[in-house]
Image: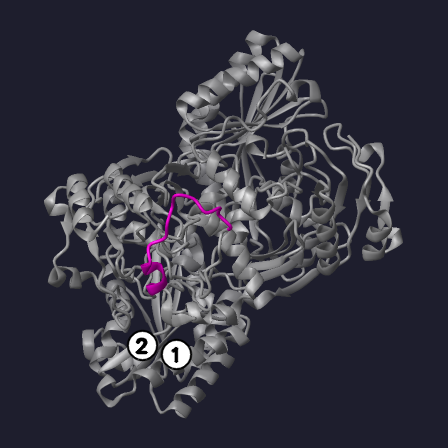
Amino acid sequence: MDRGQLIETMQEILGPEGVIHKHEELRTYECDGLMNYRVIPDLVVLPESAEQVQHVVKTCYDEGIPFVARGSGTGLSGGALPVESGVLIVLTRLRRILEVDIPNGRVVVEPGVINVWVSQEVADEGYYYAPDPASQIVSSIGGNLAENSGGVHCLKYGFTTNHVMGAEVVLADGSIVHIGGGKSPDAPGYELLGAFVGSEGTLGIATKITLRILRQPEDVRTLLAAFKDTEEAGGAVSGIIGGGIVPAAIEMMDSLTIQAVEKQVSPGFPEAGAILIVELDGPEAEVANQFEQVIKVCEENDASEIRIAEDDEERALFWKGRKAAFGAMGSIANDYYVQDGVVPRTELGAVLKKIAELSEEYGLRVANVFHAGDGNLHPLVLYDNDAGEAEKAEELAGEIVFACLEHGGSLTGEHGIGRDKMKYMPRMFTAEDMDVMQLLRCAFDPHRICNPGKIFPTPRLCGERPGPFHMHPIQKAGLAENF
Amino acid sequence: MQTQNVPTEELQNIVGEEHVRQAFADDAVDGVEPSFVVEPGTIEETSEVMKLVSREGLAVSPRGGGTKMGLGNPPGQVDLILSTARMDQLLEHVPGDQIVRTQAGLKLQDLQEKLAESDQMLGMDPPEEGATIGGIVAANASGPRRLRYGTVRDLIIGIKVVLADGTVAKAGGKVVKNVAGYDLSKLFTGSLGTLGIIAEANFRLHPVRESARTVFLEVEDPTQIPSVAQALTHSSFSQFVLDALEMRWENDRGVIAALFEGIEPAVEAQSSAATEALRSHGETSVLGRDDGDEFWKSFARRPWATGDVALKIGAPPSDLAAVLDSVVGAAERAGVEVRISGHAGTGVTFAGLSGEDDGLVEVVEEVREIRLRRGGSVVVQAAPLAVKERLEVWGSGGDYLGLTRRVKEKFDPGYNMNPGRFLGGI
């Protein structure tokens, strides 16, 4: 099937408005939130139903054409980077909330539904959807599922994987399976849903997703504490968590981040070497008691200032400052590279020190903003592309995650491996580890047409017998430079 | 079914003579007698044993504490029992990071005792005494506190496995937040030894809560149980103070119990509010931590004895009334005695049935037929062999059965691992 025939077939499935094939229009989709990788897809399709997704995928399967699923395109690791001569399946038109089931605490949605819509839908009933990535006003549930998104509140409430209870999935061969119990617990068989969530779009496309919703907490209290440096702030974090408190959120920003945020959104943060935002939620009696403890721990760690959010407005202001952190870098640097690494909480101090040394060594500024409770760092490497610093910045960012690994951590806490970090995978996993992981890939997608060229630097052959299926030559193109 | 070609000497060379023994009648898995029991002491030894297993085409059943050997279909063949008993070490516990790494053979009780020294715990409390970490992961066992902490899948953060061909691989890590690579820890959860041997597992931990209160209420009619459960689930009690919400129905008498854990003022306030909310349903009793611990020890046990047919029913929590009605009704019609317990807050119900084989089969089929229509699953967790042979132990599975089989065939192409015991005869 040549390109013309493919366009025709897709138009038959989706109607003319559901297929984008003009070069200049395709460019809109050449990258996701990670903009240093760009590939123009052969074709973009915009299905409106699970059946259409199924037809598109089946066509790709029959023709041996690779495809990539995309939600809102906010991912930061190139997970939705298109494959050359492949089809990009954009799911933004599948945006219906299909069912709200309060007695069972479940909501069933299509993958294009925006994260924050779920909480809005059930707010009047006193419920909400817990995972809250900073992108939640634009990112889609399908994308959140693919990346196993975190957020500032996941220390206490868990990640996307802990809140997805079931999914209807279109597999690479166009068949549909329902995995996870949905409303019922403990479906017999392998935990396929747990393996699917966070597989970065490489195992299939979710077309219906059952989410768990939680009761809104009785009380929420938030404070902001300023410290001399990240070490003292880190001491407070250890004190709070070591004291048996599980905060709803505990976030840290260093002085460079504070400056940038002030410039951009002016939340009126105090001048300090580091700021902590601590939020507690739960039953009133518990929150009141533990909030006093948190204040005490901050004082013991020489907090220079403690501000308590007096109302929702002030709380929103604290969070506005925090959630604006990435974007705010634009106000103090021409370009910045967002890194995502994890260290055991007790190693935070050592790794921050190492980052400072690396920053010095490379002559590039690094701003630090992170989920302190679970050791998830987001160092922002500031550079100037016009001055030819891009490569150096990426190298520095790489050194930072290697430091995370040396201290027992992980390459990524929430942004994913995608295209961006597959070259680093051998630093964290042995060839055997990755081969065994890819056995799963072979079971789901033996011909590797579903988001190929992501996560694993060396694709594993699945041992399929040669048959009528023939691989499209672009598979190679999708993988070329990372060997 | 005994296979004669187990190369005993070679096995002894790998694990040491004293760690290979002839199997006893007690080692049989649902009547299928193995030849030998092997106890490797390390991952390397486990890997060598597995290489031999796949080379010789042997069938191996992994075993931890042996508390779940009755789960699943009778195996097609068992040549070796691979016991993890000697791999029982706690490898790493960093209280400041709230994580633990353990070997599979470590008993949950021993782990909890160790963690308690740092005022921490693993948020899992399956009631089977002597269960090991590996076994709990493999069987996806859970207990009352799953309402608050979730199940194995929610707490496991890393795993090390040995595949049938001896390949050793890990996934995840020792940090709570981690999205690098596929999450094989979850895939192996509930895989019942059919994908490989679980050698090590890493978990996130939680602090031990300062105070606890148990509020319970007796009822005389099973229809009262669901309304009490819904009243508690949808009241203002945050699910993060309500640790467990459990029920029992036996001898025409029911009890529903809620466990609140947290700091003293919160626990006090929440348990009083619960008592108040349940006033219209009857008089509640309240227990403190020590009495509560005693209460839960017996209250959380499964409602069956050896020789019973043991069912685990998964259903939407709001469908509890229909579940109870179907089980109690079917049992009455079939002249079968029934005892029920369950995680009322999460939709898991257990039933222990005793009576004539025909009646037992009838009950299972009737309850299953209703679940098929209303959503959920019915798994026979244990049953006398004669009854097992007349039933689909796992039910029919969904449209994911084909995918399940493909996963099995990639991880264990020779079907050396626990053949036949899993869903779809895998």
Of the pair A471 and B424, the residue shown nearer to us? A471
Query: Marks 1 and 2: same chain?
Result: yes
Q: How crowded is the residue under tag 1: few (<14 C-alpha within 10 Å), some, or many (20+)? A: many
Of the pair A282 and B398, the residue shown nearer to us? B398
Point out residue A452 in the picture as x, y percentages from the top left corner. 37, 57
Q: Are marks 1 and 2 in contact (CB under 8 Å)?
A: yes
Magenta stretch: give its range. A463-478
Compare marks 1 and 2 and give the one earlier in the sequence.
2
Q: Which mark is residue A476?
A: none
Point out residue A89 in the picture as x, y percentages from the top left corner. 25, 51
Instruction: Decide if residue A115 is in sight here.
Output: yes
Q: Which residue is mark 2?
A: A337
Q: Amino acid at mark 1?
A: Ala
Q: How is the image coloured?
A: one colour
Of the pair A21 and B155, the residue shown nearer to us? A21
For this view, does B78 lie left or right of residue B406?
right
